């Protein structure tokens, strides 16, 4: 009772001992109700969750789920009842403690606390009870499922969706990052021994979960005042689609007009949709995961359009995906390179979880968006360097608008257009049976687009991705965070800076133009000593960590996407040279070295295989050799599959439907999609259904949905 205040206790007392109506006579029929709570996989719900039962007159009867998965409610009035799972004072239904930010944490992140507030009681959404099924589980609060009870029928069998699965790889949390619990592994085993992971992209904070929609928000008569509001009960972790959000947005606009808020000549429809979306679906990463989960389930069920509804049978087969969240929201947000290094680290942790799934003989499909591709490729690059132990253990890797180099999946390591030894994942292909790349040349974040920046202003500038190492993005200065005043390499940097200063003072000039003299200083006796010292530190750590994935990296941490660091490997030699150059050049790279290959999510196979430049003109034979990748070409339609997200109309004209970096979400609301024909139906039909779910089913499963 320590966490209960007086107001809560009084409200519970008042509801429990509510007086009967005097004009109806005494209600003699009462019964002791037992509700057995299980999910669709047959597992009992966790003990300690409070259950609040309501009779037809609004009477309230409390119960708590016990170790057998049952809640008991004494003296319930006979007739139709409904119930809700409530937030309670039990530890397993409370958020984890707040992250304690210490001086030792040098991460440059937007969020001070990255703990996921996902409680044990969240996500258990009622879908049927006895012989009754819900019209739509997402409407459980606004139009709750009702079941008849009496003296002769006091038992109720309630069935819920399984709980969501979140894999939090973020840095700032008290709980251990990575690895799934035994209960989660058991859930995946029972759900057809299949796991589908979705990894979000760059600059996505953790965010908040949504809540159940309320009756008033759907234009229905308000429920009695003693019934709970959306904030009081457990959170559904389900996605509300266009029809439901539209009604809630209309309710928001009507409220603003009723209360006389100045909305201008036209009601603020866009703002209302945004508010409704945030209320019901949550925000940031914790809204991305239910969104992806819903549309993947919808596609797996065979529904042809995104407006279709899941049937009762579909809800019983509804499968949870694993939402993988990582520290991709960096500060300042322009420093994309910092997020890339954090993605490498997240990938190293993800590799351990994938091994956990593989050892449990669970089939694995991975879907990524944007920089999430780097997280996945980092993990697979590690698994692929296990001497064949994990070869082709991943059924499918599907990369959506991948923010990695267009040759990132090659097996040939090269220094060309690879400024800091982070562009390539030469072992990743080994761990996967199939890689599918969904790309669009209308992605104005990854590069330029023909729409002139209509969807994304960065398209006018040729995209943000190609400029990731420029001064606009702080070049590679983020590397300094790993070393300066942190370890011996940071000390070497300080020594070299003092050496440079003395050298320039001796010459009688501190002009920054003298930075060109770095190479001369590096060739002094002291400079050569520092260079040997850096190489020695990296070699010593390489020998220590290469045999054990669980050993933490220190000097090599920015390159966490490699498992082993062998002295004779070209990529290790490159890392040594890169880090030495960074120390000697004040953590920057020269303009001539900033060039990178275009993003995979923008170009697909156009340069590596087709020899097509951005303007669709064929390259010369000489230029083709520069950009082509024989390894990728040889495995096209065998291991590597590419899909250009455009459609061809009856006249043979191509129309790009994936017109923004996040079109799988940005054009979902019909009222805001002003294009003719609308964008999102094509996104659903071609991307979600044909190129993701149908392709997964060809050689794997999505939950209990098979080919």
Image (cartoon, helix red, strand yellow):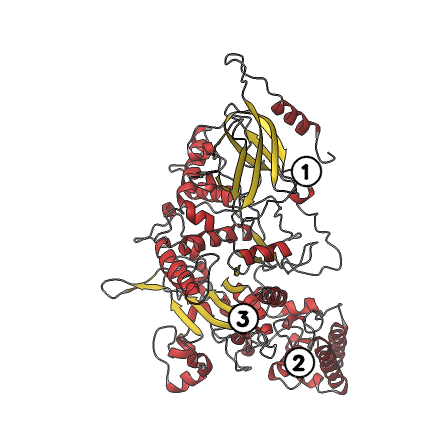
User: What's the residue at 65%, 72% (across, down)?
Assistant: 587
Label 3 secondary element: loop
As drawn, 384 above or below 621: above
Q: Which mark identifies residue 245?
A: none
Q: Are marks 2 and 1 in contact (CB under 8 Å)?
A: no
Q: Which mark is residue 393?
A: 3
- Report whether 122 appears left or right of 261: right
Residue 438 image position (x, y, % from top left):
42, 66
Q: Classify mark 2: helix, strand or loop.
A: helix
Q: Residue at x 52, y 78 (%)?
A: 417
Locate residue 662, reporting x and y percent: 45, 57
**Label 2: which residue?**
576
Horizontal side, residue 667 vs residue 188: left or right: left
Split into 4 quadrants, where in the image is the N terminus? Answer: top right
Mark 3 vs mark 2, foreground winner is 3
Circle 2 packing at 10 Å, graded few (<14), some (14-19), many (20+), is: many
Which one is in front, 337 or 206?
206
**Picture coordinates of residue 620, whole percent (x, y):** 37, 84
Q: Pointer 1 and pointer 3: residues touching (CB < 8 Å)?
A: no
How many numbered marks are there? 3
Residue 89: mark = 1
Work out which residue is located at the far front of the displayed protein and give it.
Answer: 152
Image height of 28 relative to 288, above or below: above
Tell me the CA gap for discs 2 and 1: 54 Å
- Coordinates of residue 545 in the picture (x, y in percent): 71, 75
Q: Is residue 687 above or below residue 141?
A: below
Asked if the residues shown at circle 3 and circle 2 are in contact, with their CB atoms under 8 angstroms apart, the answer is no
Quadrant location of the C terminus?
Answer: bottom left
Q: Is residue 558 visible?
A: yes
Figure check: 510 above or below 645: below
Q: Earlier in the sequence, mark 3 or mark 2?
A: 3
């Amino acid at each position: 009772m320590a966490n209960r205040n007086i107001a809560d206790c009084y409200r519970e007392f008042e509801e429990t001992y509510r007086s009967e109506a005097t004009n109806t006579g005494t209600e003699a029929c009462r019964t002791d109700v037992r509700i057995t709570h299980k999910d669709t996989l047959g597992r009992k719900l966790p003990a300690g969750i409070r259950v609040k039962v309501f009779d037809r007159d609004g009477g309230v009867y409390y119960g708590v789920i016990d170790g057998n998965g049952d809640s008991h409610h004494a003296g319930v009035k006979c007739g139709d009842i409904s119930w809700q799972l409530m937030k309670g004072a039990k530890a397993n239904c409370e958020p984890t403690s707040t992250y304690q930010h210490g001086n030792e944490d040098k991460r440059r992140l937007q969020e001070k606390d990255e703990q996921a507030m996902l409680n044990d009681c969240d996500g258990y959404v009622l879908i049927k009870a006895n012989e009754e099924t819900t019209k739509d589980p997402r409407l459980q609060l606004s139009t709750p499922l009702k079941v008849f009870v009496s003296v002769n029928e006091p038992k109720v069998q309630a069935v819920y969706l399984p709980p969501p699965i979140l894999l939090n790889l973020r840095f700032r949390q008290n709980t251990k990052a990575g690895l799934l619990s035994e209960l989660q592994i058991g859930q995946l085993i029972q759900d057809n021994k299949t796991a589908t992971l979705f990894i979000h992209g760059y600059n996505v904070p953790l965010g908040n979960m949504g809540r159940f929609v309320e009756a008033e928000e759907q234009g229905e008569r308000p429920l009695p005042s003693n019934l709970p509001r959306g904030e009081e009960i457990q959170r559904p972790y389900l996605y509300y689609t266009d029809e439901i959000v539209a009604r809630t947005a209309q309710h928001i606009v009507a409220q603003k007009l009723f209360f006389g808020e100045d909305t201008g000549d036209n009601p603020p429809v866009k703002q209302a949709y945004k508010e409704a979306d945030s209320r019901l679906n949550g925000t940031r990463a914790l809204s991305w995961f239910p969104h992806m989960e819903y549309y993947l389930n919808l596609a797996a069920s065979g529904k042809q359009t995104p407006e279709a509804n899941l049937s009762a049978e579909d809800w019983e087969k509804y499968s949870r995906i694993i939402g993988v969240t990582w520290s991709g929201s960096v500060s300042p947000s322009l420093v994309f390179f910092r997020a890339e290094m954090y993605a490498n680290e997240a990938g190293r942790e993800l590799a351990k979880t994938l091994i956990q799934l593989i050892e449990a003989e669970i089939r694995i499909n991975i879907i990524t968006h944007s920089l999430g591709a780097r997280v996945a490729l980092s993990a697979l690059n590690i698994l692929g360097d296990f001497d064949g132990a994990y070869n082709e253990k991943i059924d499918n890797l599907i990369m959506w608008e991948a923010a990695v180099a267009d040759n990132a999946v090659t097996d040939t390591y090269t220094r060309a257009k690879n400024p800091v030894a982070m562009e390539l994942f030469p072992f990743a292909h080994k761990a996967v049976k199939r890689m599918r790349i969904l790309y669009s040349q209308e992605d104005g974040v990854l590069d330029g687009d023909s729409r002139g920046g209509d969807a994304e202003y960065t398209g006018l500038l040729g995209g943000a991705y190609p400029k990731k190492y420029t001064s606009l993005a702080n070049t590679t200065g983020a590397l300094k965070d790993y070393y300066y005043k942190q370890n011996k390499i940071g000390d070497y940097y300080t020594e070299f800076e003092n050496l440079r200063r003395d050298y320039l003072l001796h010459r009688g000039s501190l002009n920054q133009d003298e930075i060109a003299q770095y190479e001369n200083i590096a060739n002094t006796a002291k400079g050569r000593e520092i260079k040997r010292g850096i190489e020695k530190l990296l070699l010593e750590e390489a020998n220590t960590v290469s045999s054990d994935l669980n050993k933490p990296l220190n000097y090599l941490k920015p390159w966490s996407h490699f498992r082993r660091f062998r002295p004779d490997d070209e990529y290790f030699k490159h890392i040594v040279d890169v880090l030495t150059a960074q120390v000697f050049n004040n953590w920057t790279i020269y303009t001539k070295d900033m060039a990178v290959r275009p993003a995979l999510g923008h170009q697909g196979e156009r340069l590596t295989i087709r020899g097509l430049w951005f303007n669709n003109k064929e390259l010369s034979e000489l230029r083709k050799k520069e950009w082509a990748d024989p390894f990728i070409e040889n495995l096209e339609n065998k291991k590597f599959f590419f899909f250009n997200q455009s459609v061809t109309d009856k006249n043979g004209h191509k129309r790009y439907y994936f017109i923004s970096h996040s079109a799988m979400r940005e054009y979902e609301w019909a009222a805001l999609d002003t294009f003719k024909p609308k964008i999102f139906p094509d996104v659903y039909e071609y991307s979600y259904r044909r190129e993701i779910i149908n392709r997964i089913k060809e050689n794997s499963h999505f939950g209990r949905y098979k080919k």
